């Protein structure tokens, strides 16, 4: 059944006579061709059965009412692109209200992005029904395809004249890239995202965001890399960039940007940096070389002196490895200083600052022989204190050589002093002889 009654906007004008039938027909055509808003309604039964569809929505989907009902079998669940239709689970769909987005299928089966707005109502019998306005998001369609090709997603914030964020919008792709479904598990709120920022990145990222919004000259750009906690609890690296639309007075009206998952790229770059650092630092004097995740308390071994292999084989955490090494190899007088040096909290804090390398010397007993070693901790990656590279370097020979040089320098200094004393003694003897000769002459 097709209703003749149409929902139309009120038209305001100072001269109603000049807006005749031809003008209204032209208006209708502009709405049709500009992807105007259509509507669809239905029931909260198992299939979310369709009750009504507006002519404008049918036009945008290239459907007749009969063809739409045949293709969808009268179910809203068959109108939406299955990949994005998790929100059509009946329990979730009942809870959804307000704005959203998704992809629906046109008559030829192609998915197209739409903006949605959902409200609840009742039919003439008082039965609950859902009502959705649907607008074809043609501009977003191409942009979404580009973002999908580079694995990125859109977001935007609206701001008031004081630069305060008053509205937040996370795209459906944004939620998906983090492992979430819809506004129920990832609402359009700032803290939906900010609460997922890695603690070490939070202050830096939030400060840059607020500075970019507040800078009326638009010189401060929001381009940043940070870690976000995924829905499964793992942290991934992301890159975000945005531009600000400003009012005439320079205040931010909207900041819009994209986010992309760069975890694989970042970790590959980190691995390359790690390998380069090991290559630069490699020396045959290293007894062992390994890589530590300070946050997760894990380590990866690259090189181990055979006599130390037991320590690495019997321990699965770095804290355990350090305790084993201290208990079984470090001499008693150095145990506390080595334990303090390898404290994960201490290293993390030190590597956050300007220090990129920490060193400490101690004595260990290896194969029954006391050896001097240098404990070296290097930052794993630039601007990242979560990872560290550890080297245990045998410096016994270099320390002995240094001692020999110092002894030689000391011996040389003693010899110089002796020579100077002898020279002064001879000079004094000559003076005394001259003095006696003078007296005899006198």
Image (spheres, rainbow, N blue to C red):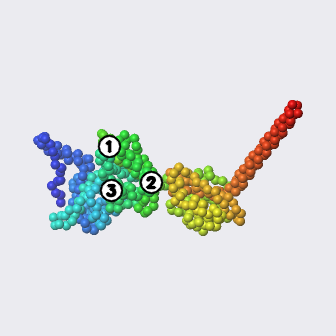
The quarter of the image holding the C terminus is top right
Crowd around label 3: few <14 · some 14–19 · many ≥20 (10 Å):
many
Residue at screen point 40% across, 43% down: 220
Residue at numbered disc 1: 251
Q: Left or right: 426 with respect to 18?
A: right
Find residue 65 and report its image quarter: bottom left
Q: Left or right: 391 with respect to 70?
A: right
- Label 3 or label 1, whichever lies nearer to me, is 1
Give the spatial CA distance, label 2 vs label 3: 22 Å
- Give coordinates of residue 50: x percent, y percent: 24, 62
- Give coordinates of residue 282: x percent, y percent: 64, 53
Labels 2 & 3 near each other (Cβ < 8 A): no
Residue at numbered disc 2: 201
- In the depicted view, which residue is nearer to us: 42 or 205? 205
Crowd around label 2: few <14 · some 14–19 · many ≥20 (10 Å):
some
Instruction: Give the vertical position of 421 relative to 6 (above or below).
Output: above
Labels 3 & 1 near each other (Cβ < 8 A): no
- Give coordinates of residue 356: x percent, y percent: 55, 51
Residue at numbered disc 3: 188
- In the depicted view, which residue is nearer to us: 147 or 409? 409
Count of marks placed on residues: 3
């Amino acid at each position: 059944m097709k209703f003749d009654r149409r929902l139309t906007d009120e038209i305001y004008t100072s001269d109603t006579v000049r807006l005749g039938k031809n003008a209204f027909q032209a208006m209708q055509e502009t709405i049709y061709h500009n992807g105007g808003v259509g509507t669809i309604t239905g029931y909260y039964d198992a299939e979310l059965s369709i009750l009504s569809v507006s002519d404008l929505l049918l036009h945008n989907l290239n459907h007749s009412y009969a063809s739409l009902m045949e293709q969808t079998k009268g179910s809203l669940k068959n109108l939406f692109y299955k990949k994005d239709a998790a929100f059509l689970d009946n329990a979730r769909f009942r809870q959804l209200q307000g704005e959203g987005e998704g992809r629906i299928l046109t008559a030829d089966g192609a998915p197209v992005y739409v903006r949605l707005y959902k409200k609840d109502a009742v039919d003439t019998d008082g039965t609950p029904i859902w009502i959705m306005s649907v607008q074809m998001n043609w501009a977003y369609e191409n942009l979404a395809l580009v973002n999908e090709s580079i694995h990125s997603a859109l977001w935007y914030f609206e701001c008031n004249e004081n630069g305060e964020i008053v509205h937040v919008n996370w795209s459906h792709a944004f939620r998906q890239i983090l492992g979430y479904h819809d506004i129920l598990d990832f609402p359009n709120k700032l803290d939906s995202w900010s609460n997922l920022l890695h603690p070490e990145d939070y202050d830096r990222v939030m400060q840059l965001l607020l500075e970019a919004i507040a800078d009326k000259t638009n010189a401060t750009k929001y381009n940043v890399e940070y870690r976000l906690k995924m829905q499964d609890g793992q942290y991934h690296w992301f890159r975000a960039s945005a531009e600000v639309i400003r009012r005439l007075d320079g205040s931010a009206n909207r900041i819009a940007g994209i986010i992309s998952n760069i975890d694989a790229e970042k970790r590959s770059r980190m691995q390359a940096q790690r390998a380069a650092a090991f290559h630069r630092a490699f020396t045959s004097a290293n007894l062992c070389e390994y890589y530590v995740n300070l946050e997760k308390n894990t380590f990866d071994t690259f090189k181990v002196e055979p006599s130390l292999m037991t320590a690495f084989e019997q321990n699965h955490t770095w804290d355990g490895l350090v305790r084993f090494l201290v208990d079984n190899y470090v001499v008693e007088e150095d145990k506390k200083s080595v334990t303090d040096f390898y404290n994960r909290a201490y290293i993390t804090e030190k590597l956050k600052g300007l220090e990129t390398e920490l060193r400490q010397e101690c004595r260990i007993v290896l194969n029954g022989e006391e050896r001097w070693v240098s404990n070296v901790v290097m930052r794993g990656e630039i601007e990242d204190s979560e990872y560290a590279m550890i080297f245990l370097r045998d410096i016994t020979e270099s320390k002995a050589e240094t001692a020999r040089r110092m002894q030689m320098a000391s011996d040389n200094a003693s010899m110089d002093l002796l020579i100077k004393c002898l020279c002064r003694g001879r000079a004094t003897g000559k003076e005394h002889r001259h003095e006696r000769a003078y007296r005899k002459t006198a």
